[in-house]
Amino acid sequence: TVRNLVNRLRGRHPLLFLCHNKKEYDLAAELDPAIPRFLPESTQEYISGLRQAKAGVCNRLHAAVALGGMGIPSVSVGTDTRLLMVEALGLPYFYVKDATVENLEGTLESLLENGQRQSERLLALRQQTWTQYTEVVRKALEL
C-alpha cells in the first residue's frame, strides 16, 4: 500500500520518509531509495526537519500528534485504541485493514487542499489545550 501510494504521489508532491528508528530508515530505502529519508536524533532536528512539511501519512500515531502540534495535518493508520488520540485532534485515520491506496490518497489530497484552514485549526487547538492545561496546574498549585 505504501509503495503504491508513494508511486501515485511522487509526481505531484515532494516526499520524505520520517523514520522512527534505524530499522524504519533501512526499510524506507527498500521502499524507494530515491525518496529522502530523515531519522532525527533530537527534538530540535525533528522540528527543523519537518518545518516545511504540508501534511503527513503516519503509522506512528504519536508522530501525528507531534505534527498536529506544529500545525501540520496528517492521516494515520493504526491497529488499536491509540487511534483515539488522533481522533481527539480531529484528524482522519484508518484501521490498518481499511487503509487502501485510494482512501489514503484521497484523504491526504483533501488535507492538502484545506491546508491553511487545517493548520490554523490545529494551532488553535494547541493554544486552547495549553491554556486549559496551565489553568489546571495553576488551580492545583493554589491548593
Image (tube, rainbow, N blue to C red):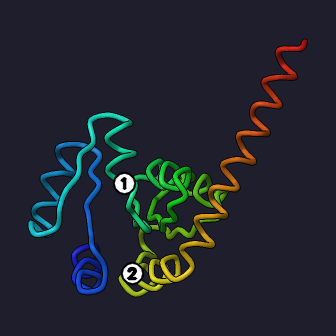
Q: In the drawing, does residue 63 fall left or right of residue 110?
A: left
**Quarter holding residue 28:** bottom left
Amino acid under disc 2: Thr
Position of residue 22 relative to residue 2, above or below, is above
Q: In the drawing, does residue 141 fall left or right of residue 58?
A: right
Circle 1 packing at 10 Å, graded few (<14), some (14-19), many (20+), is some
Q: In the drawing, does residue 24 fall left or right of residue 70?
A: left
Dot 1 and dot 2 residues touching (CB under 8 Å): no
Amino acid under disc 1: Leu
Marks 1 and 2 sit apart, C-alpha to C-alpha, by 25 Å
Q: Secondary structure at mark 1?
A: helix
Position of residue 36 relative to residue 62, above or below, is below
Position of residue 14 relative to residue 26, above or below, is below
Residue at x-position 39% and y-position 81%: 100
Q: Earlier in the sequence, mark 1 or mark 2?
A: 1
Rendered location of residue 42, percent (x, y): 32, 34
Quarter of the image with the N terminus in it = bottom left
Rendered location of residue 29, percent (x, y): 11, 60
Rendered location of residue 6, percent (x, y): 25, 77
Rendered location of residue 15, percent (x, y): 27, 70
Residue at x-position 62% and y-position 55%: 84
Q: Which residue is mark 2?
A: 100
Q: Which residue is mark 1?
A: 50
Residue at x-position 17% and y-position 61%: 36
Residue at x-position 40% and y-position 82%: 105
**Quarter holding residue 43:** top left
Q: Secondary structure at mark 2?
A: loop
